[in-house]
Image: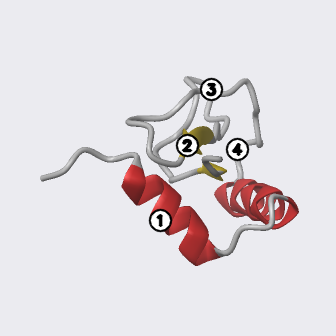
Amino acid sequence: MARIALYLDPTMTTADGQFVPAIVTEGEPGYHTTTYRYGTDYDRAKAAVAEAKTQLGLTAADVTEIVASSMPPL
């Protein structure tokens, strides 16, 4: 079964500055948008995504692998 992870970077915001993470599925190209809004403070948004990662039982290395597997080869 493919793993999923939330991913967030500083550019992932709405027009009003709300941080919005993406859902990335291992081995699937691209990502899915979410309706989650984590406020306008990047550090707090990052902390919320980190908490979700922990709840999914993922490490930072796991998330990196999942995100990398969703990118097209160079």
Q: Earlier in the sequence, mark 2 or mark 3?
A: 3
Q: Who's the residue at 51% across and 53% down the image?
A: 9
Label whose residue precedes the other's in the sequence (1 or 4): 4
Q: Considering the numbered disc 1 on the image, is that residue within a helix, a strand or a loop?
A: helix
Badge 4: how crowded within 10 Å, few (<14), some, or many (20+)? some
**Image height of 36 relative to 56, above or below:** above
Q: Which of marks 2 and 4 precedes in the sequence?
A: 2
Q: Secondary structure at mark 2?
A: strand
Quadrant of the image occupied by residue 29: top left
Which residue is the extreme one toward the right? 55
Q: Which residue does the numbered mark 3 point to in the structure image?
A: 16
Callout 4: SS = loop
- Decide: marks 2, 3 in contact (CB < 8 A)? no
**Residue drawn at x 73%, y 24% as measured from the top left:** 35
Residue placed under numbered mark 2 in the picture: 24
Q: Amino acid at mark 2?
A: Val
Which residue reaches farthest left?
74
Q: Is residue 27 left or right of residue 21?
A: left
Q: Pointer 3: residues within 10 angstroms few (<14), some, or many (20+)? A: few
In the displayed structure, 15 sits above or below 69; it is above
Q: Which mark is residue 65?
A: 1
Helix, strand, or loop for circle 3? loop
Q: Earlier in the sequence, mark 2 or mark 1?
A: 2
Judging depth in this view, the residue of 66 and 7 nearest the camera is 66
How did the renderer colour the structure?
secondary structure
Q: Amino acid at mark 4?
A: Thr
Mark before the other along the chain sequence, 3 or 1: 3
In three-dimensional space, the C-alpha distance between marks 4 and 2, rounded to whole angstroms, equals: 22 Å
Disc 3 residue type (three-letter): Asp
The answer for how far apart the CA atoms under marks 2 and 3 are is 23 Å
Q: Which label lies toward us, 3 or 1?
A: 1
Reading the image, the residue beneath label 4 is 40
